[in-house]
């Protein structure tokens, strides 16, 4: 599950830090992402500057904190530019690894239904329910001109993107592979005769 704060005033440090299970580091992560992105980056790309339920927006990790070993094995900590976390033990809670999304779009990203292309910042949909998002360009995190609030890191986006492709291939690689009975009956593959 992606760490999130989806109730209360996420701009208020004292209230955010009072929530159960929220550390000062995660509250800071939320505040910095909300300052950078303001609202759901995908809703904005869809032409809806405000999500349907404004209280449902929050900062999410592109690579969830539970995947720290995967993060470390790929050396992603070396690519972080967010000055607010450099030198800390929590580089995964950097702006480089975060984006503000509403609950619906967080679900799509966390379940690898969509990803953001690391070079073009265009959404790629890997599942039919998210097809309407395919091809939309995300600009919100890259529009922020504050160097202390960097946009999502290209290497982080690349890892998420490749993970989506791997999951999609894994789910569909054998979906159309005919079994030996269908080959002999010709029901799935048409004959040249």
Image (cartoon, grey):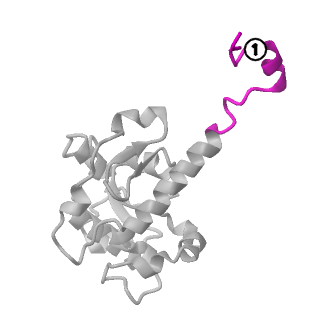
x, y percent for residue 15: 31, 69
- Looking at the image, which residue is at 46% across and 55% down? 161
Describe residue 182's horizontal placement relative to residue 4 as left or right. right
- Looking at the image, which residue is at 15% across and 69% down? 145
x, y percent for residue 153: 36, 68
Provide the residue span drawn in magenta.
172-193
Quadrant position of residue 25: bottom left
Describe residue 166's horizontal placement relative to residue 32 as left or right. right
x, y percent for residue 193: 71, 9
**What number of labels is visible?**
1
- Looking at the image, which residue is at 69% across and 36% down? 174
The answer to whether one can see residue 3 in this image is no
**In the current view of this chain or complex, which residue is farthest to the front?**
193
Q: Nearer the viewer, residue 183 or 11?
A: 183
Q: Is residue 175 above or below residue 191?
A: below
Q: Is residue 82 above or below residue 153?
A: below
Disc 1 residue crowd, few under 14, some 14–19, many 20+, Cα 10 Å: few
**In the current view of this chain or complex, which residue is farthest to the top?**
193
Q: Nearer the viewer, residue 60 or 143?
A: 143
**Residue 91 on the magenta segment:** no
Q: Secondary structure at mark 1?
A: loop
Describe residue 157's horizontal placement relative to residue 147 as left or right. right
**In the current view of this chain or complex, which residue is farthest to the bottom?**
87
Q: Nearer the viewer, residue 62 or 1?
A: 62
Taken as a whole, is the magenta stretch helix, strand or loop? loop
Residue position marked by numbered label 1 in the rendering: 186
- Looking at the image, which residue is at 48% across and 41% down? 126
Q: Is residue 39 above or below residue 86?
A: above
x, y percent for residue 138: 27, 51
Quadrant position of residue 94: bottom left
């Amino acid at each position: 599950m992606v760490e999130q704060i989806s109730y209360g005033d996420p701009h208020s440090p004292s209230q955010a830090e009072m929530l159960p299970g929220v550390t000062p580091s995660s509250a800071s992560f939320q505040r910095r992402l909300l300052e950078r992105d303001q609202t759901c980056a995908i809703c904005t790309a869809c032409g809806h500057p405000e999500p349907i339920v404004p209280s449902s927006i929050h900062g999410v990790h592109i690579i969830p904190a539970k995947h720290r070993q995967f993060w470390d094995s790929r050396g992603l900590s070396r690519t972080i530019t967010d000055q607010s976390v450099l030198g800390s033990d929590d580089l995964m809670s950097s702006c480089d690894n975060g984006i503000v999304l509403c609950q619906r779009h967080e679900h799509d990203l966390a379940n690898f239904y969509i990803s953001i292309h690391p070079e073009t910042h265009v959404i790629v949909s890997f599942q039919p329910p998210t097809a309407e998002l395919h091809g939309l360009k995300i600009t919100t995190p890259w529009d922020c001109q504050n160097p202390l609030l960097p946009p999502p890191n290209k290497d982080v986006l690349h890892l998420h993107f490749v993970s989506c492709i791997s999951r999609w291939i894994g789910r569909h690689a054998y979906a159309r592979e005919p079994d030996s009975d269908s080959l002999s009956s010709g029901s799935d593959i048409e004959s040249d005769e």
